[in-house]
Image (cartoon, rainbow, N blue to C red):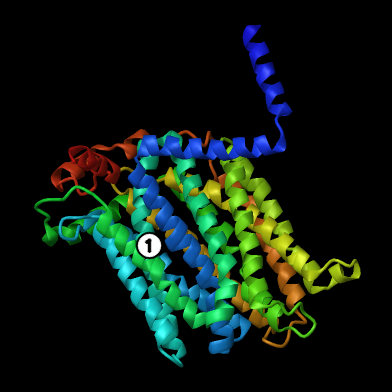
Amino acid sequence: MGQEDAVSFEGQLHRDKKPKDRILDLISRQFYWLRKLTDELHWSFVSSVVILYGINQGMSLGMSRISTQYYMKDEQKLQPSEAQVYFGLIQLPWVVKPLWGLLTDTLPILGYRRRPYFILGGFIGVVAMLSLSINQNLHLAFALLCLMAGSAGVAIADVTIDACVTENSISHPSLASDMQSLCGLSSSVGQLIGYAISGVLVHLIGSKGVFGVLSIPAGLVILVGMMTREAHVHNVAYKRASQKFMDAGKAMWMALKCENVWRPCIYMYISLALSFHIHEGMFYWYTDAKDGPSFSKEMVGSISSVGAVGSLLGVLLYQNAFKNHPFRGVLFWTQLLYGASGLVDLILVSRVNLKFGIPDYVVVVSDAAFSHMIGRLKWMPLLVLSSKLCPSGIEGTFFALLMSIDHIGMLTASWGGGLLLHAFNVTRTQFDNLWIVIVIRSILRVLPVFILFLIPSSDPNASILPTEMLKSKKADDMLENQSMEMAPLVSSVDQHLVDT
């Protein structure tokens, strides 16, 4: 009875708190959460996640998205359907993430498995962004090549930090959701900052000037690579690299043959592929349509920043309310809401909002916040699920494979959206059929609920793979015979820091 009274008293105290105290309590809980992750996983790991996900991916994504849109529209004079297809091409380096994963897992450079790839990714990003910024009147093909190179630089750094996150998810399965929440939180905050300043920067220094600024986050990746501490791998057998690649390929194939792995992979691809992207059609309508809202660069950036706030709310909502719910239930409701959120664009394009005196900007920012929040809620369980599908010994490579499947789905969605815009003749000046494209896109978003049986309905905090795949004899032999080249990064970092 005493315990019940204590719980009741604590609940009464919580209800009696002022709104200001509740906000402070929420903030303090987040700091406590970070402190817990730091104590469990080491500060160097947490810092790397924040820098790479928050600055190099999050903030850079926010800035590059807006600058690339205006670069394609104003500098290259592309049609909406063309721009949508080319945005898919820019993401091709993310499709080959398994290649970067194989390199980081099996081919150390100068005895290190992580540091050189951070430095390489940062260097490629710096060169690509400066090339776009400095050169005048670039041919479309060369401009796309530079944009793809910049994307490759981010992808290489991403797969390297993904390997670290996956290794920790396997060694600390109870913290898998927390680590993905940290990644999502860092990315969302970074995107919020990037989007908030992107429109102003494009207005002040132009899209090419923003590309020059984007060389700074890439430079920070080089700095992270130089400062990262990891154990040196001795006696590296470079001549056996091809054999290592074959072994890793066989291990991935064995994992994909497991029913608990291939079923979620099919769902992830179909779910993303059916979410057709028509962003460029809406962007051109926002800025160029005669009867459209004619948003300025600053307004476009602010709309995207509100979307980043929605993504951040989605991460916090998943972390505090849904991380312990079964994957299947969360995905069911988020998929339905995701389809419904697409219809808000229909209200805007049909100008129904103006009949009720609701400004375009209010509708757009509300849609951005809600759709991004739902999109992040839909994405988070897929990330957590992916981290739990990786066998021991090839964590980085297999997680990269799963993410490449996701990016193939996004590429399909981007090209499908471009084809849809082209089929209904949505151009720089013609938007009469845009509403049909929006309706088709919204219907397609709902269809994946019919294949949710492919997703496991088990406890999200439990391991999904069989025990022998998490710690197999084959993996142990590989670790021993290849000078621990597949050893978890965190163990080597912790040991190295203890020695110093």
Whole-percent x, y for residue 58 in the image: 49, 60
Mark 1 burial class by Cα count in 10 Å: few <14, some 14-19, many 20+: many
Residue for point 86% across, 71% down = 354
* Residue ID for mark 1: 97
Whole-percent x, y for residue 171 in the image: 35, 37
Observer able to see residue 116: yes
- Quadrant in the picture for the C terminus: top left
Observer-nearest residue: 430 or 129?
Answer: 129
Task: Say which quarter of the image contains residue 169.
Answer: top left
Q: In the picture provided, is 373 more to the left or to the right than 122? A: right
Residue for point 62% across, 56% down = 309
Identify whether 91 is placed above or below 29. below
What amino acid type should be assigned to the residue bearing mark 1? Lys
Whole-percent x, y for residue 247 in the image: 23, 53
Q: Secondary structure at mark 1?
A: helix
Whole-percent x, y for residue 496 in the image: 20, 42
Observer able to see residue 257: no
Task: Specify the farthest residue to the left.
Answer: 235
- Quadrant in the picture for the N terminus: top right
Task: Say which quarter of the image contains residue 401.
Answer: bottom left
Q: In the picture provided, is 278 more to the left or to the right than 233? A: right
Q: In the picture provided, is 207 more to the left or to the right than 223? A: right
Identify whether 479 is placed above or below 398. above
Task: Say which quarter of the image contains residue 101.
Answer: bottom left
